[in-house]
Image: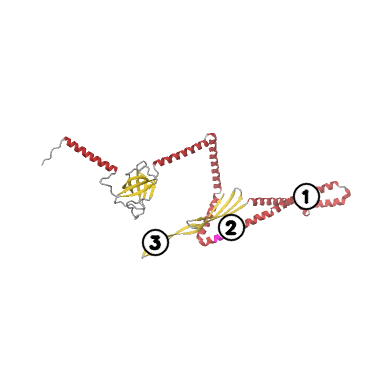
Amino acid sequence: MALPKMSSEAKVGLFVLLGIVLLVYMSLRLGGIKLGGEKGYSVFVDFDTAAGLDPNAPVSVAGVEVGRVRSIELKDSKAHLELQIDPDIKIGKDFTAVLTTKGLLGEKYLELVPGQPGAPPLKEGDYITRTRSYADIDRLIRTLTEVSDDVKEITESLSNVLGGDEGEQTVSNIVRNIEDLTFRLNRIVAKNDEQFENVMRNLDSFTALLNQEGPAITSGLKVAIKNLNESLVKTSENLNGMINENRGNLKEGIDNLRTASLSLQQAMDTVNKVTKEVGPGVTNTMNSVSSIAKKIDEGEGTIGKLVNDKTLHENINKTVAGINNYIERTENFHTFIGYRGEYLFDARDTKSYLTLRIQPKADKYYLLEIVDDPRGKKTTETRVITTNGAPTTVKEVKTTEQIKISAQIA
């Protein structure tokens, strides 16, 4: 049976009809519209804001599309989303719904981040309770604008402070002071390099000795440190008390020596004057006075030695100078003993610091610090445990208390 021949108008009409069908099919595919009713189940999720998210946006798990956003409504001042999930996809109750974008400027979509494996799945009408939103491009632009405004204010302030001749001079002075400080620090380090090495070498040896001896020396060292602390406190108190009690006596003794020397010199001047002015009528008296004066002049007796012996004068002056120097050094020498403790919640123990600072001058001191650290040393032990006939290797980390020492010269 031969088919009837189609006219040109029929051929054109058939071609147009096929084009319309193809166009409708491609539109439905690109728009994500499914014919014959939507399959799957609905779950809900609430966000503080769903700005930029459109209805029918894709819902993905690990980058694979598993559904669509059916509707977006406002409910209790929040964005209420209804999600249409494919029937063969199981969404766990511990999944997290995340609003994100495809690229920096791409369209927004909903990403479901899986939780723990084996979590019970959501059913029709259940809610996804865990949500998170990444910063959108509008908020990022606002933040960058605020940051740029702050940077502009800072640069304007710096320009006002450092601008002009005064600002240049200030910067120049700062650079010069930094160079001078760097030069001084380099010189101090170079000068005391060997001493620092000796101190660190001694500290390493002492620390190694403590580690070798173990907990026994640690407990003994604690007792020694406690006794040393008490002894230093008592010594400092006794020294301060002795200086305070005898400060007046020392100064009074020095003043008495000076007064005695001055009185003796005045007496000698008086004797010489009387010898010249008194006449022959008092010859015996004058002879006695002359004899006494001669003996004193020749250095006989205690007064003669005191007047004529230069060594005695020098010793007295040295003694007075030494006493003054001792008093001055004692007043300037300070010793500080300190203790502080830090409670470590993770170790459930106290970390103790015992500090001894010796300050011989106002601009110099020596600092020695002993630290009792409950988290000092960790050791790993491996044991084999047999459970139901099967050996299992277990590693245990043990922490032992350790004493640490630090020294500082400033």
Residue kind at label 3, given as amino acid type: Thr
Q: Quadrant of the N terminus?
A: top left
Q: Which residue is mark 1?
A: 263
Residue 390 or 403: which is nearer the viewer? 390
Task: Magenta stretch: give its range.
Answer: 220-232
Image location of residue 112, percent across then percent down: 35, 49
Image location of residue 396, percent across then percent down: 43, 60
Image location of residue 210, percent across then percent down: 52, 59
Query: Does the magenta-highlighted stretch encompass residue 259?
Result: no
Vertical relation: 314 (above or below) 16: below
222 with respect to 66 (left or right): right
Q: Which residue is mark 3?
A: 393
Contact between labelled residues 3 and 2, with CB atoms less than 8 Å apart: no
Mark 3 lies on a secondary structure that is strand
Q: Residue furthest left?
A: 1
Give the mark nearest the N terminus, 2 or 3.
2
Query: For residue 389, which quarter of the picture?
Result: bottom left
Regarding residue 24, the answer to whether it shows in the image is yes
Q: Residue furthest right?
A: 281
Q: Which residue is mark 2?
A: 229
Give the mark nearest the N terminus, 2 or 1.
2
Residue kind at label 1, given as amino acid type: Ser
Q: Residues within 10 Å of mark 1 (few under 14, many from 20)?
A: few
227 with respect to 312 (left or right): left
Mark 2 lies on a secondary structure that is helix
Q: Residues within 10 Å of mark 3 (few under 14, many from 20)?
A: few
Vertical relation: 334 (above or below) 29: below
Regarding residue 371, the answer to whether it shows in the image is no
Q: CA distance from mark 1 to mark 3?
A: 96 Å
